[in-house]
Image (spheres, rainbow, N blue to C red):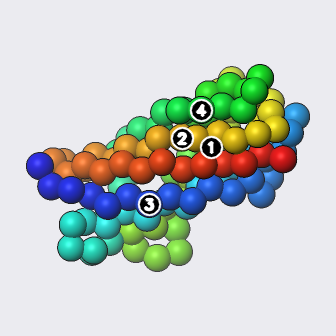
Amino acid sequence: MSRLIVTAVGTNVLATTDNSDVCYVSVSVTDAYGNPVTGLEKSDFEVGTMLVAPGGTALVLAAVRPSVLPGFYAFDMRPHGYELWMKGKYVVAIAVQKEKKKGQALVTIQID
């Protein structure tokens, strides 16, 4: 089993308290040698909500698309069932598997 190196950064550009707009997560995926991993699709990613703000709900992965450079991906994430964002911190686990290669990362999203 080969290793993928996954890093992620979240931002709340549209997502604010009491709306259900998406937040953006930028994800980088490289192989063990630092080469960008391209061609990943939504089905290659799995997300799990580790921590939600008080009164908040789990997050879902609404969309995945390639980003500005090879190996970078843009995620749209939103509250499950179009529930509303609550003020506070959300922590999401991201797992990637492509063939026999795996990697994972955590991302924090702050909603104000």
> Going from the N terminus, do you reach mark 2 or mark 1 first?
1
Question: In the image, 63: left or right of 1?
Answer: right
Kind of residue at badge 4: Leu
Kind of residue at badge 3: Thr
Asked if 33 appears above or below 97 in the picture, the reply is: below
Q: Distance between the residues labelled 3 and 2?
A: 12 Å
> Going from the N terminus, do you reach mark 3 or mark 2 first?
3
Q: Distance between the residues labelled 3 and 4?
A: 18 Å
Q: Residues within 10 Å of mark 3 (few under 14, many from 20)?
A: some
Rendered location of residue 62, percent (x, y): 59, 40
**Residue holding disc 1:** 77
Q: Which of marks 2 and 1 is in front?
A: 2
Q: Give residue 7's mark.
A: 3
Q: Is mark 3 on a helix, strand or loop?
A: strand
Asked if 98 appears above or below 71 in the picture, the reply is: above
Q: Residues within 10 Å of mark 4 (few under 14, many from 20)?
A: some
Residue in the image at 21% along x and 66% along y: 32
> Going from the N terminus, do you reach mark 3 or mark 4 first?
3
Q: What element carries label 2?
A: strand
Rendered location of residue 99, percent (x, y): 18, 48
The answer to the question of whether label 2 and label 1 lie on touching residues, with beta carbons closer than 8 A, is yes
Q: Is mark 1 on a helix, strand or loop?
A: strand
Asked if 51 appears above or below 68 in the picture, the reply is: above
**Residue holding disc 2:** 92
Residue in the image at 59% along x and 32% along y: 51
Q: Give residue 51's mark.
A: 4
Query: Is residue 8 something that shows in the picture?
Result: yes
Residue in the image at 72% along x and 32% along y: 53
Kind of residue at badge 2: Val
